[in-house]
Image: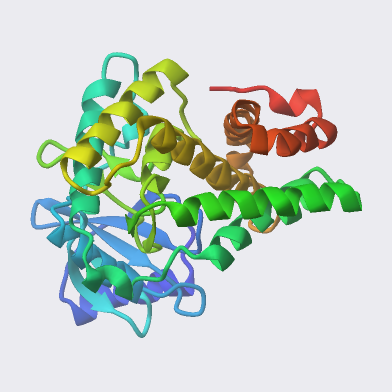
Amino acid sequence: MQDDQRLIDLQRWLRSDLGIPFTTIRPASGDASFRRYFRIDHNSESLIIMDAPPAKEDCVPFINTASLLAKAGLNVPRVLQQNLEQGYLLLSDLGTVQYLDRLNAETVDQLYSDALDALLRLQEATTEGDMQLPPYDRPLLIGEMELMREWYIGNHLNIELTERQHTTLSHSFEQLAQSALLQPQVLVHRDYHSRNLMVVDKDNPGVLDFQDAVIGAITYDLVSLLKDCYIAWPRTQLLGWVRSYHLRLLAGGIIDDVSEAQFIKWFDLMGAQRHLKVLGIFARLNIRDGKPAYLQDIPRTLSYLVDVCKRYEELVPLGNLLDEVIPTERRVDRS
């Protein structure tokens, strides 16, 4: 690992300011943002240090949301020490085993049961006080989908859309945003998927990467988990989880008088919004940030989007646009 000034300053903060002796510091995980994570050993336990350059990242949302999720009963890293001026946080360590490492046909039901239990606690705990979080409002929903137009279609595929195609895309974005806004609004993790959920022995799962939490649509985190961009499951199995969760929401009074069919449609359309966004993000990570590894997950993400466009009449125009602009060879699902 090549030393840089921030890493040198980080180690000085740990040793000189906090008095934590350690012999090695090593990368803990990659990240799709400007944050970096390192792991050290101290007093027979491992600790995590977040490096979040203040010019690029803000540690305060992480600290506030960690407290909020912990109060809701989720297993999140504890903030042990902080240096907001330099953008360093010392955190407890939730281990090295991602859900993605352990998910298979034999383990998925138990792992998802744990994740859905935690998600239900999160949504049950939403209160008026949580409204300090940003709203997942129309500008944010539309702005995320616009990433697909700019980065995936424009920069990745290098395609210039016609005026008609631009209109189709904009109309589809509006429909999907309206569907999200019609749903009950709850605390939303926003990236509740297999790379941010850790397999732990106690209070599984450990939950990471929650600093972008908002108040938004009740199906958003469910979509992130079950229509994961890094692993896919047969739709019949997926719908079994969705139907079961819908019943739990009804029983808990979190939703009221929402039919199963309506809930599934909300779920599917929310997935379309998320996957449009993610296509843009994966393309941007490659082009702007020099992180090409995410390109391998585009076909799976695209397959979710193509599938949902075939299921709902209002999304047929979007599906036709995808047929027009995306070559067949880019549609191969590598899951």
Residue 208 pos. (x, y %): 31, 52
- Expressed as whole percent of the image width and height from the top left, the position of residue 269 reads 53, 41
Pick out the residue farthest to the front.
257
Nearer to us in this view, 215 or 257? 257
Q: Is residue 89 visible to us here?
A: no
Q: Is residue 265 left or right of residue 28?
A: right
Rendered location of residue 319, percent (x, y): 72, 33
Count up the numbered dots. Answer: 0
Say which residue appears at 16% left-offset and 57% top-offset. Answer: 72
Residue 4 visible in rendering:
yes
Reply above or below: 333 against 54: above
Quarter holding residue 111: top left
Given residues 49 and 250, the one toward you in this image is 250
**Residue located farthest toward the bottom when viewing the structure as drawn:** 85
Residue drawn at (36%, 85%) of the image: 85
| Viewer-proximal residue among 187 and 199 | 187
Q: Is residue 23 above or below residue 59?
A: above
User: Quarter-wise, where is residue 225 in the image?
Assistant: top left
- Check the picture and name the quadrant holding the N terminus: bottom left
Residue at (28% x, 14% y) in the render? 106
Q: Position of residue 154 (x, y in %)?
A: 80, 51
